[in-house]
Amino acid sequence: MEGLKSTMTNRIEAQCRAKGLRLTGQRRLIAQVLSEMRDHPDVMALHQRVVARDDRVSLSTVYRTVKRLEEEGVLARHEVRGGRARYEKASKRHHDHLIDSATGRVIEFSSPEIERLQEEIARRMGYRLVGHRLELYGERLEQDTSRKQ
Amino acid sequence: MEGLKSTMTNRIEAQCRAKGLRLTGQRRLIAQVLSEMRDHPDVMALHQRVVARDDRVSLSTVYRTVKRLEEEGVLARHEVRGGRARYEKASKRHHDHLIDSATGRVIEFSSPEIERLQEEIARRMGYRLVGHRLELYGERLEQDTSRKQ
DNA sequence: ATAACTGCAAACTTTTTGCTCGATG
DNA sequence: CATCGAGCAAAAAGTTTGCAGTTAT
């Protein structure tokens, strides 16, 4: 495969290199799309973004790549009710998600206090916390400009 | 369908009646299995329990029934990574889940403090909390009776 | 009576995989 | 040049659905 090569590297591509994954043209392109994502796209969406730049990348390859990157700890996968799983970069510091129940928009947040409580709860129940998933679902409050708090 | 009838009623069956669902033999049986469940079974497991008592109930019917009951707010569905969705009664008071990462066992807990923090976080971000999902993943601590910590 | 429900098989959706060929380190 | 990756189509896996016959109300 030629023509996909770009000399520009990016964070995800660097991680591939570090993990010893082969840098094929397809992977470079997928890595770039992943590096640029600021949302939480599913595999179909990723494939579309990739194909927009080079239509010779198959859906299978995107599936295989994100799966591999999840296993390598580069991406985080989020299961969604009755639909396609969504991905995001795992590299960033830990955070949880607030999901706008009207629009589906995902907003990140983190709360050390909640993290601490979680560990405490697990410990009290005889467990060591090895992971968690916290999603809040909310409705936008009116943006009452007349000094609402 | 006859022969499935049982005069014994149960909570879920009562809810079906209240919602105006027809009480077929299959539904009565499924309702009974659901009422008795103390775990978080998936549709296959439910079907097996049902079929153990009467093998004339199809998997489709179980799927259709739990879906309907979820829509009616009688059951809660939990999506699981790469597998089958699990169900539990929605009627019980709110709680979250601690999942044994080794065995997949699900343990319920609740923490008013975490609940409160969640509301506060949502509010600070301009949202009214309408729901949430919290799952902790943990590894059993050694139950070392000889006091090692 | 008739609208709701069931069983069966087939359809669907998302994700994985076998195979063969091509590209990378 | 040995291995790993890609593309394609087919298989899995979980869930839904069309249809024709049954049943609860």
Image (tube, coloured by chain):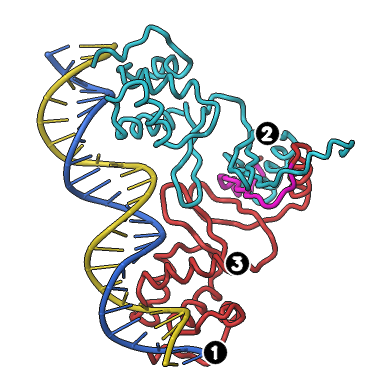
Chain colours: A cyan, B red, C yellow, D blue
- Which quarter of the image is occupied by the C terminus of chain B? top right
| Residue A87 percent across, percent down from the top left | 48, 34
The local crowd at label 1, few if under 14, some if 14 to 19, many if 20 or more residues have their Cα within 10 Å, is: few
Residue at 42% across, 74% down: B49
Q: Please report, as a chain letter, where disc 2 is located.
A: A
Which picture quadrant has residue A134? top right
Query: What's the amino acid at mark 1?
Result: Met
Which mark, by number, is residue A109? 2
Q: Which residue is mark 1?
A: B8
Q: Is residue A58 left or right of residue B145?
A: left
Label 3 secondary element? loop
Observer-side mark, 3 or 1, equals: 3
Residue at 62% across, 50% down: B133
Overall secondary structure of the magenta section: strand
Q: CA distance from mark 2 to mark 3?
A: 29 Å
Label 2 secondary element? strand
Label 1 secondary element? loop
Q: Please report, as a chain letter, where disc 1 is located.
A: B
Magenta span contains residue A36: no
Q: Please report, as a chain letter, where disc 3 is located.
A: B
Q: Which residue is mark 3?
A: B73
Query: What's the amino acid at mark 3?
Result: Gly
| Residue A133 percent across, percent down from the top left | 59, 43
Q: Is residue B42 above or below residue A39?
A: below
> Over which residues does the magenta segment extend?
B127-148
The local crowd at label 2, few if under 14, some if 14 to 19, many if 20 or more residues have their Cα within 10 Å, is: some
Q: Is residue D4 left or right of residue B21?
A: left
Which picture quadrant has residue A19? top left
